């Protein structure tokens, strides 16, 4: 089997579009995290994390990451809000669960159509 050099337009543009897509998803993630933290704290106070998270599964990435960081002596634990340890799918659960959408996010983000897919 021989390896062919391909300089087609597709081969040239695909990495570029992948980087653009990654950048857009990253910006969306950061925006949603910041909005979640700010708006939930404004509505429910600084302890909202304990009361408004849908289930323990959503908290698992945070707990596992902190436990891992603490287990490494060479690692300095840099505290970040637990929302920064969540996957985008877990963040979605927070946005739509326990009335959070109705009480907090619907005014800022509009309809839930995009999140329900």
Image (cartoon, rainbow, N blue to C red):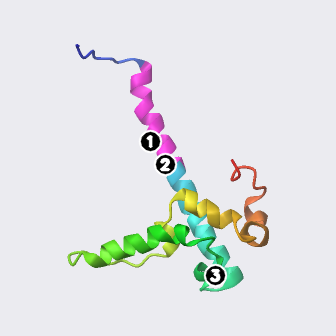
Q: Which mark is in front, 3 or 1? A: 3
- Residue beneath the point at 77% across and 64% down: 106
Q: Residues within 10 Å of mark 3 (few under 14, many from 20)?
A: few
Of residues 62 and 31, the one drawn nearer to the viewer in this rendering:
62
Give x and y (percent) for residue 15. Answer: 41, 34
Q: How crowded is mark 2: few (under 14 residues within 10 Å), some or many (20 or more)?
A: few
Does 26 appear above or below 21? below
Q: List the residue tagged with mark 1.
A: 19
Q: List the residue tagged with mark 3.
A: 51
Of residues 23 and 83, the one drawn nearer to the viewer in this rendering:
83
Main secondary structure type of the part rendered in magenta? helix
Is 65 left, or right, of 84 in this rendering?
Answer: left
Q: Could you say which disc has been placed on residue 57 in the image?
A: none
**Mark closest to the chain's N terminus, 2 or 3:** 2
Rendered image quadrant of residue 70? bottom left
How far apart, in angstroms, are the residues tagged by discs 1 and 2?
6 Å
Rendered image quadrant of residue 61? bottom left
Point out the stretch of residues depicted in magenta: 9-24
Residue 13 located within the stretch drawn in magenta: yes
Of residues 111 and 7, the one drawn nearer to the viewer in this rendering:
111
């Amino acid at each position: 089997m021989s390896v062919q050099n391909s300089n087609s337009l597709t081969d040239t543009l695909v990495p570029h579009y992948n980087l653009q897509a990654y950048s857009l998803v990253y910006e969306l993630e950061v925006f949603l995290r910041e909005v979640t933290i700010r708006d939930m704290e404004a509505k429910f106070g600084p302890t909202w994390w304990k009361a408004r998270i849908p289930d323990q599964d959503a908290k698992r990435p945070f707990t596992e990451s902190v436990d891992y960081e603490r287990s490494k002596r060479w690692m300095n634990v840099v505290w970040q809000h637990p929302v920064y340890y969540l996957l985008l799918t877990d963040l979605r659960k927070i946005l739509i669960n326990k009335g959070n959408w109705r009480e907090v996010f619907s005014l800022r983000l509009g309809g839930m159509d995009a999140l329900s897919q």
